[in-house]
Image (cartoon, rainbow, N blue to C red):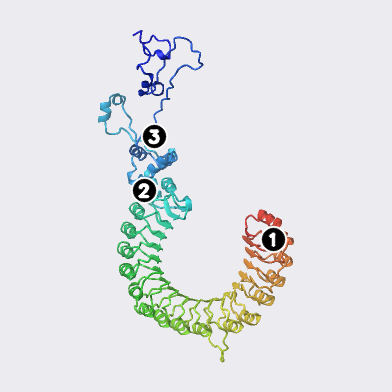
Amino acid sequence: MSKVFDFSGVNEFFPGGFLYPNPKESNIFPSIGSHVDVYFTPRKRSRISAPFIVSEEPKKQPSIEVLPDECLFEIFRRLPGGQERSACACVSKRWLMILSSIRREEICAAKTTQLVDPEIKSSPQLARDSAEPKEKIEFGDSNGIKSEDEEEKNDSHGYLSRCLEGKKATDVRLAAIAVGTSTRGGLGKLSIRGSVATRGLTNLGLKAISHGCPSLGVLSLWNLSSINDEGLSEIASGCRSLEKLDLSHCPSITDKGLISIASNCPSLMSVTIESCSSIGNDTLKALGSYCPNLRSITVKNCPLIGDQGIASLLSSAGQVLTKAKFQELDISDVSLAIIGHYGSAMTDLALIGLQNVNERGFWVMGKGQGLQKLKMLTIIACGGVSDLGVEALGQGCPEMNVFSLKKCPLISDNGVVSFAKASGSLQSLQLEECHRITQCGIFGILANCGGKLKALAFVNCLGLRDLHFGFPLTFHCQSLRLLTIRNCPGFGDAGLAMLGQVCPKLTHLDVSGLQGITEAGFLPLVRSSQARLEKVNLNGCVNLTDKVVISVTKLHGETLELLNLDGCRYITDLSLMAIARNCSVLSELDVSMSGITDSGIAVLARAEQLSLQILSLSNCSLVSDKSLPLLKLLGKTLVGLNIKHCTGISSGTIDILLEQLWRCDMLS
């Protein structure tokens, strides 16, 4: 044995030199120094500063990370409270994802420890045999940890709301939300808005939400191509309290996912499906069959949904469905007939962009006598609706209060007047881009509205032109309070003056965009008003002068709350003087693109009774830096100030205003 270690150099590891005669053959063995931890004490003092030591790798300390996910799962589900689970979720992404995979029912509710007898502890066999705990220790409020009963009670409410947009929408964030919100009121509303940058979101994120947020009541998924039926099915299985679902531009979701939601979420009350190309009639059938609490549905631009889906939905849920909106769908008159027959609970109905429906469909819908409770009806861009259909709707909907017609080219005076006669409960009527409506239609509506009409609006109706009636108008519409005639270029002074005679109780007046009216038509309306005006919008009435503002403020200054003079180029400081002198409750004033100067701003600033909240001076080139102290004085009550494109105000003055009026939302 002594000969084995009797060597004097590196080549004498074995007696007789190399193990093989040919040293080149020694490479068939791996290097000792790189694989074996060996240390030899040298026989002589080494001239090399470092001894020949094969480094020993440090021994790794025992770590919980070596456990597989199954073991960590069992550990985490036995944590005593939500705070502990949240703390563990902050350790690593792995721990977070494991915690988010734990369902509520999988969390151990019993928080106990055993007082082990020393004799039992010393004997492994006795320790295995002792199954009953000796004493239970409850983790109560004393150590800041809520009991499981308290957590379940808070989670059932679902107070919290979260919204993820763009690249912030990832599986990790959803997992963190699922774990973190469980003990802070529970997640009640979740909105995810995708974009081109949304790449980290998959069905795994929704799975985490379904496991950790059983209290979820509102879910909105917008523009998410990575979410499919699997994710929606997870929500259906874990969030059975879901009440509102909003899906928009989710092409991967099909009928299968929606059927799962409908069959597992009986509390579902509102559903919106927009631009989901893979969702069809089976979804509407399932919603009608499985959702007894469904109250509202919106379906827009879904090419696979047709008459069969509408029929299945209404025939099953027509007695509970109160609000429906059908837009840009490939449906025909059959669907309108179904709505008119089965919509017995319907109170709010919107039909938008339906290109394949005709006069017959609207007529049958009105004659179906099923819309007895309908109060609001909106028809937009449905080219098939005509006077005959509108008249039938007025007769078949006796409780209708609000009626809106937009972009319906076949509607004329006869249709709207017949509707006003038939619908005795009409309170609000809006007509937009209905170019066959004339002034005869306006006065016909006012004469036949039944005395309940409160709001009347005409927007972009090119057929409204001044007509000179050869007979006096003897009727009065005492109920009308809100009158809007906006961007109707043919409407002028004659029509406005007659409206003032017929409608003496106006409180809100909007004649924006009527460039043809002057003080000759506006002053008679103001003077004939028996009520006090509260809101007046004269935006774009370029020919009105200070005389109009002076008259309005003298007669209605005590009640005037809003005055919009944007684009009235002939308005000067005289108007501001009248406002400062006569208006005591004015909160919003817009004098953009007018002729006011620093002197007018000074008058406003010194008016003690004024408490303006919103002031717009946009494009007022005569307002300069001299108004700085005046604007600071007005800023004590302002919450909004617009000084955009005021060329007389320097950037330094703007900086001072931004600094000192920090409570005010400023546009500059």
Q: Which mark is residue 570?
A: none
Q: Amino acid at mark 1?
A: Leu
The quadrant where residue 424 appears: bottom left
Q: Amino acid at mark 3?
A: Glu
Residue 145 visible here: no
Point out the tag, 2 or 1, that comes first from the N-terminus.
Answer: 2
Point out the tag, 2 or 3, that comes first from the N-terminus.
Answer: 3
Residue 649 visible here: yes
Quadrant (top left/top right/bottom left/bottom right) for the N terminus: top left
Give coordinates of residue 314: x percent, y percent: 33, 69
Whether the residues at callouts 2 and 1 have beta carbons within 8 Å, the answer is no
Residue bearing the label numbered 3: 65
From the image, state whether disc 2 or disc 3 is nearer to you.
3
Pointer 1 local density, CA inside 10 Å: few below 14, some 14–19, many at least 20: many
Give coordinates of residue 406: x percent, y percent: 47, 75
Residue bearing the label numbered 1: 631
Q: Amino acid at mark 2?
A: His
Q: Is residue 236 above or below residue 609?
A: above
599 sits left or right of 283 in the view: right
The quadrant where residue 29 appears: top left
Pointer 3 local density, CA inside 10 Å: few below 14, some 14–19, many at least 20: few
Whether the residues at callouts 2 and 3 have beta carbons within 8 Å, the answer is no
Residue bearing the label numbered 2: 211
Q: Residue at x 33, y 32 (%)?
A: 114
Q: Secondary structure at mark 1?
A: helix
Pointer 2 local density, CA inside 10 Å: few below 14, some 14–19, many at least 20: many
Give coordinates of residue 185: x percent, y percent: 43, 49
Give coordinates of residue 435: x percent, y percent: 50, 80
